Amino acid sequence: MKDLLSDLANEQAALDGLVADIRDDQWSVMTPFSEWTVQDQISHLAFFDGAAFLAMTDPQAFQAQSASFPADETVFDVTLDKGRRMAPADLLAWWRRERESLLGALGSREAKDRIEWFGPPMSVRTLATARLMETWAHGQNIVDALGLLRPATDRLRHIAQLGYITFGWSFFNRRLDPPDKLIRLELLAPEGDTWVWGPEAADETVRGPAEDFCLVVTQRRHPYDTGLEWSGPVTEQWLLYAQAFAGPPTFGPRPGRFPKTGA
């Protein structure tokens, strides 16, 4: 758990470093995600880091907050409103406060403690992993919008793990029965190791760069535009449906929206 929290803090700091010195006009640049600006991406992270802290420290207040949200897509306008009314420097200060509070709360709990969240409750470990995934994924939107460079790191292992264990969720969330298939995942880590999930005798396999898999399960790239290779129809269906985050079913970019990775 200590290593996970260190990786979460480092992922947040890395994104902070990318946006801290951008020009004021760049905060209003539209990103490739849901017609959100760069400012919206950081607003989203600040709001939900705060919501996660509230869920851990005052479950009743969190339940009241979540119950007050609209049940349709306008919920995101509600959660983005505060950040949209802030100057960039104030927004960054808000996000820094929220994530510092969250890290403190996460560090005070046991990894297996259950926390109420949007949808089913989750463990503290899973909540921390989800916040790391969200930080990286929304950071990718900013990287894409502003043409920034962001080296891949072995912190991606947490996101890859989350992507693998949400195989069933990616079908269930679309009101489909998860296929009764074993899938093996073999990923090349940024620092050269190989990460593996699933048995050697699995029915189907996914292989390729860890960053590409993380881009797919967070719906930042279409699987056809990555260096992933896979065998079997179930695996292809999974990669097309993959959704490592909570919420209603969504789809990522269409094929060809971004250049093929490694091209």
Image (cartoon, rainbow, N blue to C red):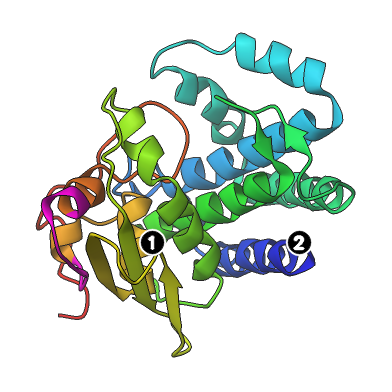
Q: Secondary structure at mark 1?
A: helix
Residue 177: give x, y in percent of width and height.
28, 29
Q: Look at 35% across and 29% down and name the residue there.
A: 172
Q: Name the quadrant containing residue 231.
A: bottom left
Q: Is residue 20 left or right of residue 58?
A: left
Work out which residue is located at the far right of the displayed protein and give it.
Answer: 108
Q: In the image, which disc is placed on residue 205?
A: none
Q: Which residues are magenta?
A: 226-235
Quick one: 225 or 160, which is closer to the camera? 160
Q: Which residue is mark 1?
A: 214
Q: Quarter holding the N terminus?
A: bottom right
Tell me what residue is drawn at x 40 percent, y 44 percent: 37
Can residue 147 be seen in the rendering of this structure? no
Horizontal side, residue 60 vs residue 192: left or right:
right
Q: Quadrant of the C terminus?
A: bottom left
Q: Earlier in the sequence, mark 1 or mark 2?
A: 2
Q: Quadrant of residue 207?
A: bottom left
Residue 110: image x %, image y %?
84, 48
Q: Residue, x 21% and y 80% (percent of image)? A: 262
In this view, which residue lies farthest toward the bottom? 192
Q: Is residue 72 above or below residue 107?
A: above
233 magenta-colored: yes
Across and down, in percent, residue 229 comes to: 18, 70
Q: CA distance from mark 1 to mark 2?
A: 21 Å
Q: Nearer the viewer, residue 243 or 167?
A: 167
Compared to residue 121, the image places residue 146 above or below, namely below
**Label 2: which residue?**
1
